[in-house]
Image (tube, rainbow, N blue to C red):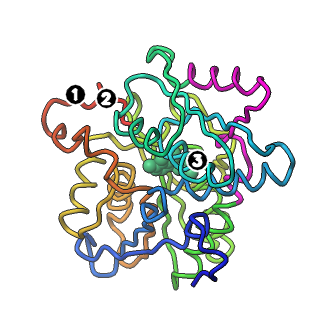
Amino acid sequence: MAQDGQRTLAALVGSTPIVELRNLSPRPGVRLFAKLEGQNPSGSVKDRIAVAMLDAAEESGALRPGATLVEASTGNTAIALAALAPRRGYRVRVVLPKGIVPSIADILDLYGAEIEWCEPEAGMRGAIRRVQELAEQPGYYAVGQFSDPANVRCHYATTGEEIARAMERVDVFVAGIGTGGTITGVARRLREQWPDVQIVGVEPRLGERLQGLRSLSEGYIPPLLDLGLLDRRFLVDSASAIAAARDVMRAEGVFAGVSSGAALHTALRVAEGMESRNIVMMFSDGAWKYLPSRPWDATGADAEALDEVHWW
Ligand SMILES: Cc1ncc(COP(=O)(O)O)c(C=O)c1O
């Protein structure tokens, strides 16, 4: 329990629960466990890195009091910064490509972040360019979740540590790959405890969008991702991820986001032919912010419709 002096929002980040998904287990010996990152204060795993990156930047002196943080994330990292950074005296400015899920902009706006739109054709590359421009101006600081080692370090020290302590044994760990921070940090910690743990990365199928995740096949290898730690990579299509997210709500009552569905879909494929294994999956966020765009309606209907929305 937090001491009185620690009753801050940041003190609530991490220490997320792990729930066993008994109804979705394909065979009695195959046990599925989901780490529920949606329980973090702003609703996703990214609260962890927001705190860690701000701590590191303050410590190094790179981040000065009163600065405006700039970020080109189209989702959870921006939301985490918008929720947590103002508590420490920073303003947050987020550059977003037009066409992203509208609820993301609403959430950022409600938290008080400034939003700057860029043309959708420029996509995330355009947004990143704009952030670099801003970061060259005095008073701005670019948060670099794709390059900041604090990202991996915090997943090693918190997410990985929590799983290692909570579980008697982990045979398989499944996580989506965005920056690669989660899978790299957690895999390092779990390998210390269980050297033969199988590490499985989840990516969107080429040309498809899954919020928060990147396809390595598109040619971008996130610099923080240690590919040598991965035993397998799974490519998941949006429709399967969305269908699996619905399954987990119906079968288990867990309100899982789309990348959680992708992790579950992957875990069930990996479990094929296994008799007795503990599989831990990252459920990186809940489903709330996806509700306004109704992804569940699109599955099984017109597959084209899935591609028209920038899920993330
Ligand atoms: C919902 C969701 N799942 C998974 C990930 C991937 O995590 P990481 O960036 O640590 O690889 C992200 C990252 O943005 C995300 O937003």
Q: Residues within 10 Å of mark 1 (few under 14, many from 20)?
A: few
| Residue 245 at x, y percent in the picture | 28, 55
Q: Is label 2's Cβ within 8 Å of ligand 1?
A: no
Instruction: Tell me the residue that label 2 is attached to.
Output: 309
Pair 3/1: label in front: 3
Q: Is residue 277 visible?
A: yes
Q: Which residues are magenta?
A: 125-153
Residue at 47%, 60% in the rendered image: 174
Q: Residues within 10 Å of mark 3 (few under 14, many from 20)?
A: many
User: What is the number of the mark on residue 305?
Assistant: 1
* Left or right position of 138 against 276: right
Q: 220 above or below 32?
A: above
**Label 2 with label 1: CB-CB less than 8 Å:** yes
Nearest the eye: 21 or 122: 122
Furthest residue in direction left, as rendered: 301
Instruction: Tell me the residue that label 3 is attached to.
Output: 81
| Residue 295 at x, y percent in the picture | 24, 41
| Secondary element type, mark 3 | helix
Pair 3/2: label in front: 3
| Secondary element type, mark 2 | loop
* Left or right position of 247 against 287: left
Q: Amino acid at mark 1?
A: Ala
Alpha carbon of mark 2 to alpha carbon of mark 1: how far?
7 Å
Is tag 3's residue or tag 2's residue first in the polypeptide sequence? Answer: 3
